[in-house]
Image: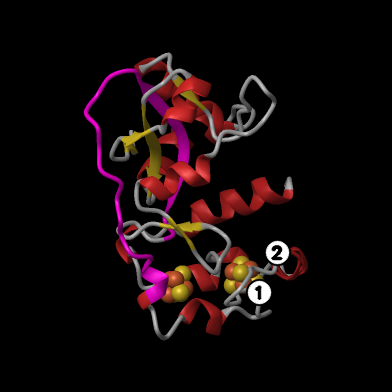
Amino acid sequence: MGLSLSQPFNLPIKERVQYAWRYGQLVLGVGQGHYNHFITTARHLANPLDTWSEKIIKNQTKKYIMPMQKNRRGQYYPLQKWARRVGFHPSPLGIAIHPKFGLWVSIRGVVFHKTGKKRPLLHHKSPCKTCIAKPCMAVCPVGAVGDSNFDYPACRSYIQQSNQSTCVQGGCLARRACPVGKKYQYRPNKFRFHWRAMNGV
Ligand code: SF4
Ligand code: SF4
């Protein structure tokens, strides 16, 4: 179906008490594969990608959360922190980068277990640390990709005004310039799906 599981990660004591689980695994949508399956079966649904992902996860387990779900205290779960435990790092594009899948992976949910083996934390170096050329920064037409932060307003305003730009038609130039995980790169149809969802069209 195109969804896969990350390596399990341990929840520290404080989180175990808070959430009543001991181990977690991220549910990952890697590359183009899950899109092809999802688009043929669920494109007619409301919030199609989330609805489709949840249906698949729910079929496997009752102990899961979805990415934008809040806990009993009304707070979001610390997804970014958990992602760091299985090898993700921040990138200059404002999205997480994975050492193997690069920028071509999304977190579709998290599943939990009460039992399991204690796992060491993954200590992959961020691929951005050793990327000297940083092509993602060079190719963005509005300079939205910077060393210290990603300029969301500049990117958003550019793509909203440039319907026919390469960024909209073929997908973010900066993202496509990244050398990590190239073989998992999304095709233009998936990029356009996300662009339409983001802009409500
Ligand atoms: S091009 Fe280099 S700096 Fe940019 S996201 Fe990819 S690895 Fe990181
Ligand atoms: S979509 Fe285009 S404007 Fe936005 S960050 Fe990517 S390259 Fe830059």
Ligand 2 within 8 A of label 1's CB?
yes
Q: Is residue 157 above or below residue 25?
A: below
- Location of residue 148 (image quadrant): bottom right
Q: Alpha-carbon neighbours of circle 2 within 10 Å: few (<14), some, or many (≥20)?
A: few
State yes or no: residue 124 in magenta.
yes
Circle on res. 177: none
**CB of mark 2 within 8 Å of CB of mark 1?**
yes
Q: Nearer the viewer, residue 99 or 156?
A: 99
Name the residue: 35% across, 46% down.
86
Q: Is residue 124 left or right of residue 191?
A: left
Tell me which image quadrant ligand 1 sits in.
Answer: bottom left
Q: Secondary structure at mark 2?
A: helix
Farthest left residue in view = 117
- The numbered mark at residue 152 is 2
Quadrant location of residue 88?
Answer: bottom left
Q: Earlier in the sequence, mark 2 or mark 1?
A: 1
* Residue 114 at x, y percent in the picture: 34, 18
Tell me where residue 52 appears, x and y as whole percent. Answer: 49, 28
Side of 11 where 201 appears, left or right:
right
Q: Secondary structure at mark 1?
A: loop
169 horizontally vs 82: left or right:
right
Instruction: Please name the amino acid that badge 1 sits on.
Output: Ala
Residue in front for this viewpoint, 78 or 101: 78
Q: Is residue 13 above or below residue 29?
A: above
Q: How is the image coloured?
A: secondary structure
Q: Answer yes or no: is residue 129 visible.
A: yes
Q: Quadrant of the N terminus?
A: top left
Q: Of the residues shown, which amino acid type is indicated by label 2?
A: Tyr
Image point (46%, 81%), residue name: 135
| Disc sitting over residue 144 in the figure | 1
Task: Give how far apart the Cα atoms at labels 2 and 1 are.
Answer: 7 Å
- Picture residue at 55% right of the left edge, 35% below the top: 67
